[in-house]
Structure formats: C-alpha cells, structure tokens
Amino acid sequence: MKDKSKKILALLVERYPDLKQFRRKVIDQAAIDCGYNYTACTELIGDSFKVQRGLYDYSSILLDANAPVAASTAAAPTVMKLAAPVTSILNTDTYVPTVESTYVRWGEFADIASIIKSRAFYPVYIAGLSGNGKTMMVEQACAYAEREYVRVQISPETDEDDLIGGFRLLNGETVFAKGPVVKAMERGAILLIDEIDRSTNKIMCLQGVLEGKPIMIKKTGEVIRPAKGFNVIATANTKGKGSDDGRFVSATVIDEAFLERFVCTIEQTYPPLATERKIVVKHMEKYNKVDEDFAEKLVTWSEVIRKTFADGGVDELISTRRLCHIAHTFSIFDDRLKAINMCISRFDEDTKLAFSDLYSKIDASVNAKSSEVPPLEDPSKVPF
C-alpha cells in the first residue's frame, strides 16, 4: 500500500478506532487533514474495498498485522478525543430527481428554477391550497437543473432528532446518524421542508440553518458548514398564521422570528384552465387513455366548483391533484361518471351528489347506468 494511503488510513483509525467501514466524505476529509487532496484516496476507494455506493470496508487490511492500526504520522493533526468516542454516520445519499414526463411547467416554476440554478442561499416559503403542485414544482425544478434534493415531510411529531440527527445502534456500536438537514448542508443540496405549517415549536432548531451559517451538532460537538449551493425551500397550505376557515385543522401558527428568516414568500394558486387541461391530458397519456373531450369537461367542471367555492356556495373544491386521480381512475374503468364518483367519495354525501350532478349537466354523454358495477354472476362481464 502506498505511503499516502497508509497515512490516511492511520488517521481514520486514530479518529474512529471502533469502525472498519467509512463513508467517502470521511475518507476525503482525512486526506485533506493529512495535507493531500481527494486524489490521494484513489487506492482506498477501489472496488476491492467498496461495499456499496459511497461506503468502503477496510476490515481485511486493518486485521493485517502490517496494517497501520496504531500508526501515527507527523502529517496528521492532533485530534482531541471524547472520553467515550462518538462517531457519526450519514444514513443515505441525496439524489437528483427524475424529470417527470407528465409535468407541465407553469406559474412560479421559472422563478423557483432561477433560484435553484443560481446556487445562492435564498430561503423560500411557498404557500397555497392543497393539490396545486407546490412540491412537484420544486422537485421538477431540481430535476431540470440537475440539482441534488432532499425532501423532509413535517408532522407534529417531527423534532430535532428527525431533522439534525440522533444516536443509533449500528453493529453493536453507538453512532450518531446525521439527519436530512445535515445531509443537505454537507452536499450543497436543496432542502425541501414539506408541509412546514404542520410542525410544532420543535422545528426552531432550524433557525440557524435558515441563516445559511455553520451549525453545531449539540450531541457531538461537530460543526457543520453548508456547502456551496445549499438552500432551503418550504411548502405549506397557509402562510404560517394558522387556518381560520378550518380547512387545514392541523396547520399551526409558526413563530414570527422563524418566518422572518425566509427571504420571500410565493403564493401558488391553481393553474389556469388551459394549463390544467394540459396537465390532465399528460396524465391520460401516462396511463394510455387519452380522451381530450373528457379532459376539457373535467377542467370546466373544476373551474365552476372553484368559483362557487370562492363565492361561498360550497365548502369543498376540486384540486388539480384530484383531476389527475380521476384521469387515472378513468384509465382503469373507462367510465367518466364512475371515475368521478369514485374520486369524490371522500366528500360528504351532499357535496358528492352536488358535484356529480354538476358534471352530469356539463357532460350530456354520461349515463347513470354506466357507473353501475357489473354483476359478478355474469362471467362475460368479469374482467378476468
């Protein structure tokens, strides 16, 4: 083994005496601390040591009597150890989302894409009603820009351990598993905090993160510095002031000091009629069941419902996501009214009947009999 590899390995053993497997980022850092650059790690990251992507096992050479298990080098800096050494691991890697063929770029997509492509630290808060494409917009902007992306789903139980990381038992050893926030910071990735208004005050641990400055992991003392390109984007149904109309009962009031750390707020509405028609047709293409007349009538139907909702005539509305669900259901049952009725059954009976009746008035071709389930006793009508 080359001298450089021995020195790097010696430093790894000195820092992590109980570990035999190491992440690529840890190996690269050891090389830098030894006075080399990452190219010095070539021998240590060969296929003979590779366990999986980004993880390398040196058990075979550390068990060798000639391996530099107890070696110490002048190039290696003095490392202060805790009384009980604690190592940290990174559970999973970030990823670049796949470009979705059904996605139609519209609305605020261009602005979000510009922010992501700039690689600037520019925290953004996106607010809008459910099912209008907030999360998909961020994901697809990352896909088109080929940027790494981490999505964190927030719930009332989400706390610092879920976001920053916590102790885990791995192969009989207690290690600190870095959370998705730290992962995104180290990789210079886009951190998407989804449904941030479902959180409690436990997310206040992110205040420093939203300033774009280094943070210290309190449980290990490790300082994490955000890599170039790291940014935070949050989505929510409200602007962090709660939901007065009761539509989003789980939405909480977010601390004003926390909200102030977002540079801007973007309000996402439902797409205009022509755009929504394109979205529905794209989903029909995805499921190999294109009916442009049905798509036209669906978006007309949803638009009437939304206008009635805005005027206070109904308490529910049809989201873009719901229209896509109807297109999917239609591809299976080949029945317009049945597809609609199945996808609006989550509403109360009065609302369901009103929505179904409205569609029947818009589309004269539908027939109530078409939504009946064929009797199982007739073998010719059973689809298998």
Image (cartoon, rainbow, N blue to C red):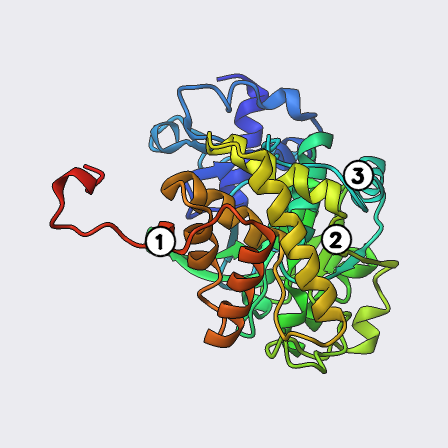
Q: Which residue is mark 1?
A: 369
Label 1, secondary structure: give it.
Answer: helix
Q: Residues within 10 Å of mark 1 (few under 14, many from 20)?
A: few
Mark 2 and mark 3 in contact (Cβ < 8 Å)? Answer: no
Instruction: Give the mark, 3 or 2, whose residue is nearer the N terminus.
Output: 3
Q: In the image, is 270 to the left or to the right of 294? A: right
Mark pair 1, 2: CA separation: 51 Å
Give the vertical position of 311 relative to 27 (above or below): below
Residue 34, percent across and down?
Answer: 66, 32
Instruction: Give the mark, 1 or 2, whose residue is nearer the N terminus.
Output: 2
Q: Residues within 10 Å of mark 2 (few under 14, many from 20)?
A: many
Which residue type does callout 3 highlight? Ala
Mark pair 3, 1: CA separation: 47 Å
Residue 90 in view, yes or no? no
Q: Nearer the viewer, residue 133 or 309?
A: 309
Q: Which residue is mark 3?
A: 113
Q: Which residue is mark 2?
A: 232
Residue 120 in view, yes or no? yes
Which residue type does callout 2 highlight? Val
Residue that appears at 43% across and 19% down? 47
Which residue type does callout 1 highlight? Lys
Residue 124, percent across and down?
Answer: 80, 55
Mark 2 and mark 1 in contact (Cβ < 8 Å)? Answer: no
Label 3, secondary structure: give it.
Answer: helix
Camera-near label (3 vs 1) is: 1
Residue 276: assigned label: none
Q: In the image, is 194 to the left or to the right of 71? A: right
Q: In the image, is 20 to the left or to the right of 37? A: left
Residue 10, percent across and down?
Answer: 52, 34
